Image (cartoon, rainbow, N blue to C red):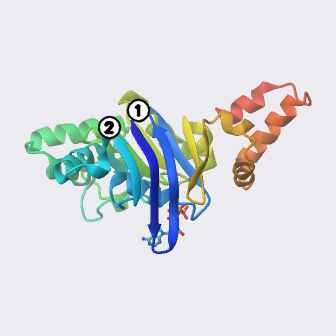
Amino acid sequence: MIEVKDIKKGFGEKQVLKGVNVKMEAGKCNLIIGASGSGKTVFMKCLVGLFEPDEGEILYNGINFLTMDDEQRKDIRKQIGMLFQGSALFDSQTVEQNIMFPLDMFTKDNYATKLKRVNEVLDRVKLKDVNKKFPAELSGGMKKRVGIARAIVLNPKYLFCDEPNSGLDPQTSLVIDKLIKEITVEYEITTIVNTHDMNSVMEIGDHIIYMHQGQKEWEGNNKEIIFSKNELLNEFIFASEFLKDAKDMRMLEQTGKIDNDRNMDEMIK
Ligand SMILES: Nc1ncnc2c1ncn2[C@@H]1O[C@H](COP(=O)(O)OP(=O)(O)OP(=O)(O)O)[C@@H](O)[C@H]1O
């Protein structure tokens, strides 16, 4: 679990995070949503230690990340897997070398042990016969799977995903979302996803945090978001056709003008 207590972060005069409080539990996909510039990336960067907040606490399983010494921080970093936008694979390295990289960095295992682990995670993300391929030879969806395999190769307790669906078609996005969700549940990972993808919100949003101008404006799950009466959230949602349709459908249902749950269930499945 990650618990964030009242973190604030500014750059010069500009206050970007204005006191964010949130708890993100293990085994759940915690999605950060919000308009461009609302502070999602700054928030994520504070959580992983790329930015130092000006105030507040970030507790990793109860221990404050911000007051840890370098060794303790290194320990936490080992427990963090990261899936970057665009997968961020090393182009000049094979899939196997890409996934082995964190093992080379953080373990003293021999090659055979590392290869066994690489093959285990490749198997988990359902990729076959790609060990010796280079990223350029893979589709966008396959690259994401390699990115996920690399992010989980050290058995992380925490997984950070920055726009995991960027550049993917809707069908491939769905497959990647499901994979992230399955892995989160299976290995009890605390997963944090920064996303603009409203399909993801509905698909894997166990816990959705809506950021507005550096503050947590709303939180809830993918069922609750449909009923939310928060005006700022609704305004944000209504910019997305998909969620707007889902909300409209639910409202029609509630006013008795539609007596069919099936369509709605299909939409929010
Ligand atoms: N290193 C920095 N120095 C100064 N200002 C910054 C820095 N990083 C971010 N900001 C500012 O913080 C604000 C929030 O930026 P952030 O990148 O967190 O937004 P976001 O919600 O992630 O947006 P997007 O969805 O477009 O990625 C912006 O006004 C941005 O200009």
Left or right position of 142 against 214:
left
| Element type where label 2 sits in the image | loop
Is residue 166 among what the camera can see?
no
> x, y (%) of residue 56?
41, 51
The C terminus appears in which quarter of the rendering? Answer: top right
Residue count near mark 1 (Cα–Cα under 10 Å), binned few <14, some 14–19, many ≥20: some
**Residue 41, label in figure:** none
What is the secondary structure assignment of the residue under circle 1?
loop
Q: Which residue is mark 2?
A: 157
Does mark 2's beta carbon lie closer than 8 Å to ligand 1?
Answer: no
Q: Which residue has dot 1 on it? A: 26
Q: Against 154, is 264 above or below?
A: above
Q: Amino acid at mark 2?
A: Lys
- In the current view of this chain or complex, which residue is farthest to the front? 55
Q: Which quarter shows the N terminus?
A: top left
For badge 1, the amino acid type reads Ala
Which residue of the protein is positioned furthest toward the bottom in this rendering? 12
Distance from label 2 to label 1 (Cα)? 8 Å
Image quadrant assignment for residue 236: bottom right
Residue 230 point in image, percent of width and height = 72, 45
| Vertical relation: 175 (above or below) 54 | above
Near mark 2 (Cα within 10 A), the count class, few <14, some 14-19 or many ≥20, is: many
Mark 2 near mark 1, Cβ–Cβ under 8 Å?
yes
